[in-house]
Amino acid sequence: MQRSACLIFNPVAGQGNPDQDLTLIRRILEPELELDIRFTSKEIGAEQLAQEAIERGAPLIIASGGDGTLSAAANALIGRDIPLGIISRGTANAFAGALGIPDTIEAACETIVTGQIKTVDAALCNGKPMVLLAGIGFEAETVNKANREAKNRFGVLAYIIAGFRQLREMKRFLAEIETEDKTTTVTAIAVTVANAAPPTSVLAQGPAGLVADDGLLDLTIVAPMNKAGAIAAGYHLLKTALSGNAAKRRDIGYMRAQRFKIVTEPPQKVVLDGELIGNTPIEIECVPGSLNILVPANADEALDEKLNGLPDLVVELKDSFLAEP
């Protein structure tokens, strides 16, 4: 008996021809799967379509679109046994890059047909599901500046252009970061909390490799003193991402924890999985092993933390952590 799947397709994602994309997807998948195809619209998003597919008893859900579509579909599947197949057709394709999923239609479809199910973590940010990352400060302002018209015209370069524009308005802020065992206060231009992130999500690349199934969240602090330092820090983070080495600059810090509470002064914009959701404060908690994704096999290793050298750094251990067991 032929397997079945619900395909959630965003017809306005990316810069390609959606009709040609869908024809290619169907040509590859339909010999293997009976597809129930549902289209997103302004009125009905991918999360609602995924929820409806769950209620219909779909054994497999496939999402095709940009990172917003993919994350929204994944949100509906957190805590469920139903696997998610990914076909990226967006601007940045961060979701696929973070989980090692090919970002071409042909290879992504092949992964859905022949790939393995990998159980990964998700998270909750102020009660909202998070699959990739939450960015505070610089990253959120950059996403805010990269509008749909720019992304349609320039593709992923829209984020780079927006980033350089944001450098002209770079502002530092005070961040209080609370974990299970301590409270850290530091001045920064960006704080990023990631469950998973590709190398192109530069501001999340403090640790040496982000692991999507370790039950922990990775926080990166970028704290340059000026614009030149910001450019140098960004370049350093890109190199660490590509090399697999942890950041070593004094103005970059990182830490891992299961949950973070972050308060900033003044309040900062927050971007969650590519969408602006408001301002700080935020509380983020990892939800281990809560999402099943069809991926090629891969493996990552984790390091601990580095905070020394950051400006205005204060770390206070909690009494409960210091107390004898």
Image (spheres, grey):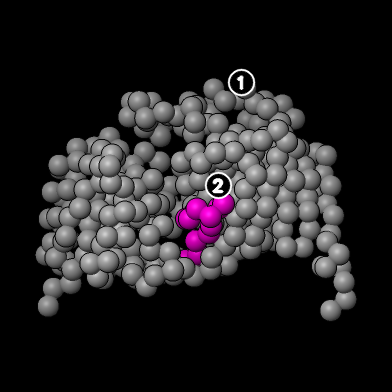
Circle 2 Cα neighbour tier, 10 Å, few/some/many (<14 / 14–19 / ≥20): many
Which residue is rendered at x = 49% and y = 38% of the image?
A: 276
Q: Position of residue 261 (x, y in %)?
A: 67, 52
Location of the C terminus by quadrant is: bottom right
Q: Position of residue 188 (x, y in %)?
A: 71, 37
121 magenta-colored: yes
User: Which residue type carries mark 1?
Assistant: Arg
Q: Position of residue 114 (x, y in %)?
A: 27, 68
Q: Quadrant of residue 226?
A: top right
Asked if residue 293 shows in the view, the reply is: yes
- Locate residue 83 relative to residue 130 in the image: left or right: left
Observer-nearest of 281 and 65? 281
Q: Which residue is mark 2?
A: 134
Location of the N terminus by quadrant is: bottom left
**Which stretch appears magenta?**
120-131
User: Which residue type carries mark 2?
Assistant: Ala
- Locate residue 122 relative to residue 15 in the image: left or right: right
Q: Position of residue 211 (x, y in %)?
A: 54, 61
Nearer the observer: mark 1 or 2; the answer is 2
**Callout 2: SS:** strand
Report the disc number at residue 168.
1
Which residue is rendered at x = 82% and y = 44% of the image?
A: 313
Separation of marks 1 and 2 at Cα, in angstroms:
23 Å
Observer-nearest of 139 and 241? 139
**Callout 1: SS:** loop
Is residue 32 placed above or below 160 in the rendered structure? below
